[in-house]
Amino acid sequence: MRRGSLFLAAARFLIQAGFGPTDEDIAEVKSRGYEGWIDDQLAKAPYMSYNTYLVDQIVPLQAATFNGGTMGMGYFTRARFVPFRHADTEMGGGTQNNVDQMNLDTAFMRSVVHGEDVLRKKTFWTLLQLLVTSKNNSQKATGRSASHYLDLVYRGAFSDYGDLLGDVSMNCYMGFWLSSVTNIKEDPAAGTKPDENYAREIMQLFTMGLYDYDSDGTYKTDNGRLIETYTNQDVTRMAKVFTGLVWASNNWWTAVYREDRARGPMFTVDFQHDQTEKVLFPDKPYRLEVPAGMNAEPEIRFVCEKLSEMWNTAVFVSRHFIRFMVTSNPTPEYVQRVAQRYLATNGNLGQTVKAVLLDPEARGPRFLFDETFGKVREPYVRFLSTVKNFEVGQETDAAPYSWDNLQFWNHVQTNRGVFEDEYDVTLKMMGQGFFNAQSVFNYFKPEYQEPGEIQAMGMVSPEMQILSTGTAIGTINFLADRLRYGLHSKVVNSVSTDPQVNYEFAKEGAYLDAGSVEAADDLVDRLNLLMAGGMATHEAIADYRQPILKTGSAASAWNTLPPIDRVRFAVLKLFADSSAAVQR
């Protein structure tokens, strides 16, 4: 059964717009068309709430585990808790059982498998790589605090960027990450000045970028030199905007830290906010005047809105979405078209993503003949695509807040016979994971150029910055472990004592029942469609067919393997192929 061009086009589209296709997704795209599918996705509500997941499902487990004094099975297979000591008299001292941020990975993975809001999740993922914060936050930012930040970005994935940027700037988790929390106005007597960290990053990483863009989306130059968007004086002036933000509403200057005060938006203390007039970028076409007398939150939201309306921000954000969804090296015309759509819709992210995916360069035949088109797929996204493709845990309860037998990420067994936290495993083996960047600069820089031919051609290859011998092999080994052991298991003395959540290969296994060459071809064809958008080479397809049919020089080694193991091998082999590692 050879797949027609509509199947291939739909699968390729879903790799760009989501975490890979399923049969149902492909059928829906073919039925509704690209624009109809996108419009339907833009109307879908978020599948779940990260905070609700933690509050309703994880936190109640404290009574049965930590508080009850039994750490055993419940601790390892259900949830992670961090005891936090405090001496706040309001709470009477004692211990707060804060939910570890590791539990958020389970929530994310559940949404990838079960959630129908495919485009929202991919947009959410892309925004997390732009508005970067991480589980590597300070010790004062815990799972509950992180869940509020994730919900903020997840719910706002299709909102106006200025609104989302204002929410992010007010969020406590971001405040701890970039030290804007407890940021107060200048005190000449004490010799203190506002912290400049967030002021610098909101310009460099969230909006304008480092250099001015021309009307066509390329960099402006002055006698061959790039023109910087802001100066150190602008950083100092911008820092005054983000003053008067604290994590406790009263007695903030003496209050002992409490975890529940670090959730959601920061509080404002307007008498500690710099209310002077501020003139930012005074010599630029985008000169920004902030009137005197504004309180903290109105001023912060005013500046965020103005930053989001700049042409530089339109180009910066548009190029980011193009690079993470479609191609690392878009033409200036592609970037310009998307940036114009961004500005025409007041920075609406849903419409911006729609412009990215429907652009002639994304949907046209350029990928067939232009070797500079496409991108290296992020290793974690490649892994997520297999979870989505083969419906890991699909047979379990699909309710968004039901976690029984579907804890993906507590402790995972490796082929070394030991347990490791997913945080350590994914970061160590892939160089990437969910919400665990090592710094505000994310896992890799957007302008990274791999030395050699790519650099010589003036192209960028962001994802290749984390590509090494270790991560290339580690990514494949990680999937091999998950195919063998499942995504959740607890093993004591090499004996599994907890239900595993495994890949579902019922559809794939049915092809092997026929035992014919045609059936084997159909199976490889299916794997090629789901994992590589139909882009695997003929030579690769012929090579994959041998172990499935138990033919060729290795036939005797395969004769004793059951069909499901031959499917697993074919999946792993195609996963390692360049056609699945490179998105075209």
Image: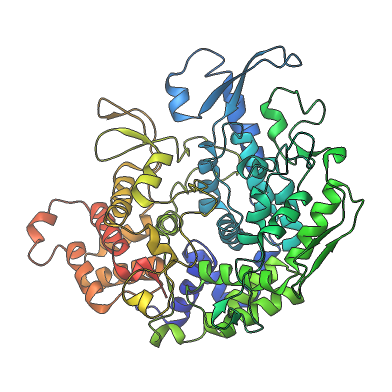
Q: Residue furthest right?
A: 293
In the image, residue 311 above or below residue 169: below
In the image, residue 582 above or below residue 419: below
Rendering coords of residue 287 (x, y %): 79, 69
> In which image quadrant can residue 231 be found?
bottom right
The quarter in which the N terminus is drawn is: bottom left
In depth, the one of 44 and 577 nearer the eye is: 577
Residue 411 appears in view: yes
| Residue appearing at x 50%, y 37% in the figure | 102
In depth, the one of 342 and 385 nearer the eye is: 342
Rendering coords of residue 189 (x, y %): 79, 35
Residue 39 appears in view: no
Rendering coords of residue 269 (x, y %): 84, 37
Q: How many marks?
A: 0
Rendering coords of residue 320 (x, y %): 57, 67
| Residue appearing at x 36%, y 45% in the figure | 428
The quarter in which the C terminus is drawn is: bottom left
In the image, residue 77 above or below residue 10: above
Position of residue 258 in the picture relative to residue 577 (left or right): right
Colour setup of the view: rainbow
| Residue appearing at x 59%, y 33% in the figure | 142
